[in-house]
């Protein structure tokens, strides 16, 4: 591992320690049922956190994602339940709502020059108010468990081949992308990971992936929600790592003025990133509504926003822009979800949970800052 590049190692080590501590305190923590429930629980907020990752890569922040997620779930529920609109149409309309809201924020940030913090803070308030207006006086709209959205968090693939097949594909894709990426870097004369390190990383991933698949199959099988989350992560990771658009996002986060001089349409990329954040917030809102089988006035409020931001940062995405990965959302949510889940099993007060999560977040930012400073001193940034 090169100087200053800790990557996801501290997060994984921390997660192992967290799991070990809770397992010693309560043997039910690493049970198949509990891990399966945890995997479904993290999906909604995790999807929202993916959108936050995109914004953080620009070195910006979006404070509206919680309210946008609640608004999207309300739009879907009113259309599908109250007005009888087909769910296959209501879902895209809810997602488009999130995309439009995100583009609206991006326009004021990129074209008008309003700081992202300010425009999304205004959005946090305004979209929460609009959600309350959309839901009306009843405040809660229950969803059908057997409907399209209700199925998303309540369907499991009981065939064991689905979980094991997903693990095999994940390991194969990881090795192929790492190996081919190293070859391209070597051919270009750029330092690359040695094959031995790639093999070790792949072996570790294989143990974790097939271990997770085995545990899921011991309960109800592969959750559809988790499979959707993984597909989204793989797809958006490809966008960030393997497309010109992704390179533009990283370029803006690294040095906006240099990116502008290189011919990148800075305003367009910024608007698109906030639109992606809005879309992912809407998607996450639908998944949360699917899990609780309702859209209500509490949707998108509480700790949702802070957890989504904390997950991205704890998972390894830099607050300073230009460095991160969509996989940060998964790792960060595993940490936050595990802390919440473990403490609930032990009957520990929520106040302690918040303090510990805050300490973990601070540690993640400190590690990021130290890593960045180390890179600067090594003359690599």
Image (spheres, helix red, strand yellow):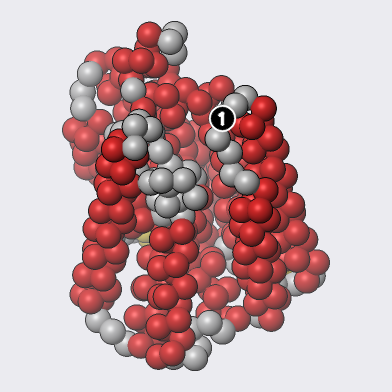
Residue 333 to residue 118: above or below: below
Give the answer, above or below, for where 246 lies relative to 283.
Answer: above
Q: Name the residue at 46% across, 34% down.
A: 276
Q: Which residue is mark 1?
A: 190
Q: Position of residue 244 (x, y in %)?
A: 56, 22
> Residue 79 location, x and y as percent?
50, 44
| Residue located 41% across and 46% down the image | 3
Q: Where does the C terminus fall, quadrant-wise?
A: top left
The answer to which of 137 and 340 lies nearer the viewer is 340
Q: Is residue 356 left or right of residue 220?
A: left
x then y, percent, for residue 156: 68, 68
**Number of marks:** 1
Which residue: 66% across, 69% down?
Answer: 207
- At x 22%, y 18%, the residue is 113
Q: Secondary structure at mark 1?
A: loop
Q: Residue 73 or 206: which is nearer the viewer?
A: 206
Residue 53 in picture, x, y percent from top left: 41, 42
**Is residue 241 visible from the viewing direction of this image?**
yes
Residue 133 seen in the figure: no
Q: Is residue 68 above or below residue 39?
A: above
Task: Please determine whether, in this image, residue 81 is positioned above or below residue 251.
Answer: below
Q: Residues within 10 Å of mark 1 (few under 14, many from 20)?
A: few
């Amino acid at each position: 591992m090169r100087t200053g590049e800790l990557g996801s190692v501290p997060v994984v080590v921390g997660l192992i320690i967290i799991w070990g501590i809770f397992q010693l305190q309560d043997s039910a923590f690493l049970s198949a049922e509990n891990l399966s429930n945890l995997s479904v629980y993290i999906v909604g907020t995790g999807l929202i956190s993916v959108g936050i990752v995109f914004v953080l890569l620009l070195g910006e922040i979006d404070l509206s994602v919680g309210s946008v997620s609640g608004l999207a779930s309300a739009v879907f529920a009113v259309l599908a339940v109250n007005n009888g609109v087909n769910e296959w149409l209501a879902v895209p309309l809810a997602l488009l709502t999130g995309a439009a809201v995100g583009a609206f924020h991006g326009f004021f940030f990129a074209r008008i020059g309003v700081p992202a913090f300010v425009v999304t803070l205004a959005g946090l308030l305004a979209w929460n108010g609009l959600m309350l207006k959309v839901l009306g006086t009843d405040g809660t709209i229950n969803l059908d468990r057997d409907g399209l959205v209700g199925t998303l968090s309540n369907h499991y693939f009981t065939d064991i081949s689905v979980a094991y097949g997903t693990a095999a594909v994940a390991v194969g894709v990881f090795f192929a992308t790492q190996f081919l990426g190293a070859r391209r870097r070597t051919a270009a004369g750029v330092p690359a990971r040695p094959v031995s390190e790639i093999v070790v990383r792949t072996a570790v991933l294989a143990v974790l992936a097939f271990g997770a698949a085995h545990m899921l199959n011991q309960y109800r099988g592969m959750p559809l929600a988790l499979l959707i989350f993984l597909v989204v992560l793989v797809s958006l990771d490809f966008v960030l790592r393997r497309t010109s658009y992704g390179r533009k996002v990283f370029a803006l986060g690294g040095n906006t003025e240099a990116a502008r001089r290189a011919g990148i349409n800075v305003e367009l990329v910024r608007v698109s990133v906030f639109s992606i954040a809005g879309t992912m917030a809407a998607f996450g809102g639908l998944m949360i509504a699917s899990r609780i089988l309702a859209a209500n006035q509490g949707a998108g409020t509480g700790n949702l926003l802070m957890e989504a931001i904390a997950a991205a940062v704890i998972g390894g995405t830099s607050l300073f822009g230009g460095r991160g990965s969509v996989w940060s959302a998964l790792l960060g949510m595993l940490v936050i979800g595990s802390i919440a889940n473990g403490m609930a099993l032990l009957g520990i007060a929520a106040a302690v949970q918040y303090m510990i999560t805050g300490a973990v977040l601070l540690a993640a930012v400190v590690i990021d800052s130290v890593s960045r400073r180390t890179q600067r001193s090594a003359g690599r940034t």
